Amino acid sequence: MTFATLGLIEPLLRALETLGYQTPTPVQAQAIPAVLAGRDLMAAAQTGTGKTAGFALPLLQLLTLEGPKVAANSARALILCPTRELAEQVHASVAEYAQHLPLTTYAVYGGVSINPQMMKLRKGVDILVATPGRLIDLFRQNALKLNQLQTLVLDEADRMLDLGFSEELANIYRMLPKKRQTLLFSATFSDDIRLLAGQMLNDPLSIEVSPRNVAANTVKQWVVPVDKKRKPELFVHLMRKGRWKQVLVFAKTRNGVDALVDKLQGLGINADGIHGDKPQATRQRALDRFKASDVQILVATDVAARGLDIEDLPLVVNFDLPIVAEDYIHRIGRTGRAGNTGEAISLVCADEVNMLSAIEMLTRQTLTRKMEPDFEPEHRVPDTDASGQVVKKPKKPKKPKTSGGGGKRNLGKWVDSGEVAPAEPSIKPVRKVPVFNTGPRKKK
Ligand code: AMP
């Protein structure tokens, strides 16, 4: 199968040739004809599957061949993305695909001044990529009208809900024309996503290109058990031992990112960090420098986990496991993209065992554990498997036959590790919100 046989027009084929895309990926093969035929779409596609081109190519074609010229302060197609970085990246891809077409494209997101965005929208844009909050601001300030909108794309819909955008999505839904095409892309399909799909989509075609909730099999994954306090030391040890060249590292908190970056920089290692507290320009610069290989180690919170496409990234390290198990799939989806192979290593301490178990259950696999000599944890990480079972306490050895019994025996250090599974924060703390509730927005 070729892109030409899918019915794409010549200017798009030319752009794809320049980009070196020869064969459509499975999601593209299914999505392109359906979108060209005007269908709504509900697509389960994980990152790295080529889903952006899957929606962008037919969308560009429809806008080129159909519909009126874009009016002032209007958009003909809207692509909603959960994060600023993803909005930038999707926009960059769309602009590349559109390079030979007479269409205008633009991306808007928060964290930067709204005025230049309002100016840019004056003439109208054919395709607008936006994060939900900024889109609503622009709409409320009359900088954007949506009555000309013919297509809405919800990219990484599950992430938008995870980030607490359900109220914004409900507001945007009310701003849209009833007659439109809607394409929903999500890596995972929770009940909330299905509810959202039920409200926003009209007789959608369902596409599933890989088994649901399964991480890309081009990524070799394993776990290194370690005590929490020794994680930084283990990271540096593994980095030196493996001669890691370029690594994306995920930490749970903003403070965690800063602490690890400080530690690495203190050792003369070329590292930088991105998280939600940093200004957008700083985040983008760190990401650009990492992509250009000017930075060797990029440490990030989950704000960077979704959708970011970093060419040939060989390795992702989970310095901390994610609290939401689905994020594991997105994090490791930064490697092994577009047919390349990659590695994902997770440094796991005893009090992350419930997260590990949730990840194994979600991905339906028991992750291989590799002990690193000299870093064996004092607090043993209890056994887990894909059934979701956590063996909290190692079996005690048989009672030694001693006279007088009842006294406390010295059973060795490992027996104490029965205390290793303290209550963990709930594995899925943020997802159980009805999609269109009107409650207060969750903080990102
Ligand atoms: P995505 O899942 O949309 O983020 O795409 C992942 C990566 O695959 C991006 O770097 C795309 O440029 C690349 N890509 C998408 N479609 C193709 C294709 N048909 N052939 C080769 N590379 C592709």
Image (spheres, rainbow, N blue to C red):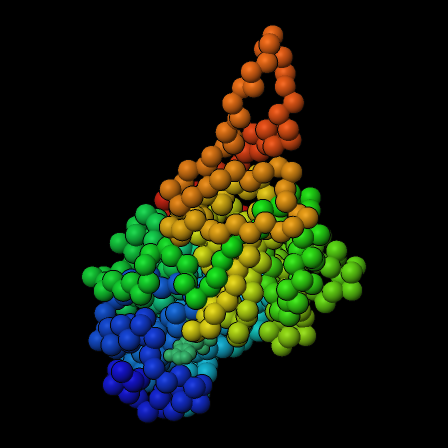
- Image height check: is 387 above or below 319? above
- Please indicate, yes or no, whether residue 167 appears anywhere in the rendered image: no
> Residue reaching furthest top?
404
The residue drawn where x is 34% and y is 75% is 25
| Frontmost residue, 131 versus 149 | 131
Q: Quadrant of the N terminus?
A: bottom left
Above or below 424: residue 4:
below
Examine the rendering and report whether any part of residue 227 can be seen: yes
Q: Residue at x 40, y 51 (%)?
A: 365
In this rendering, position of residue 200 left or right of residue 285: left
Camera-nearest residue between 144 and 110: 110
x and y, in percent, of residue 67 in the image: 29, 81
**Which residue appears at 32% of the width and 47% of the height?**
191
Q: Is residue 129 above or below residue 370?
A: below
| Residue 9 figure quarter | bottom left
Total marks in image? 0
- Ligand 1: which quarter? bottom left
In screen coordinates, is 424 left or right of 211?
Answer: right
- The residue nearer to you, when weighing 160 against 421, is 421
Q: Residue at the spot x=67%, y=70% of the render?
A: 295
Q: Position of residue 89 (x, y in %)?
A: 50, 72
Task: Name the spot of residue 101 as percent of width and height, x first.
Answer: 39, 88
Where does the image place residue 37, in percent across and percent down from the top left?
Answer: 22, 76
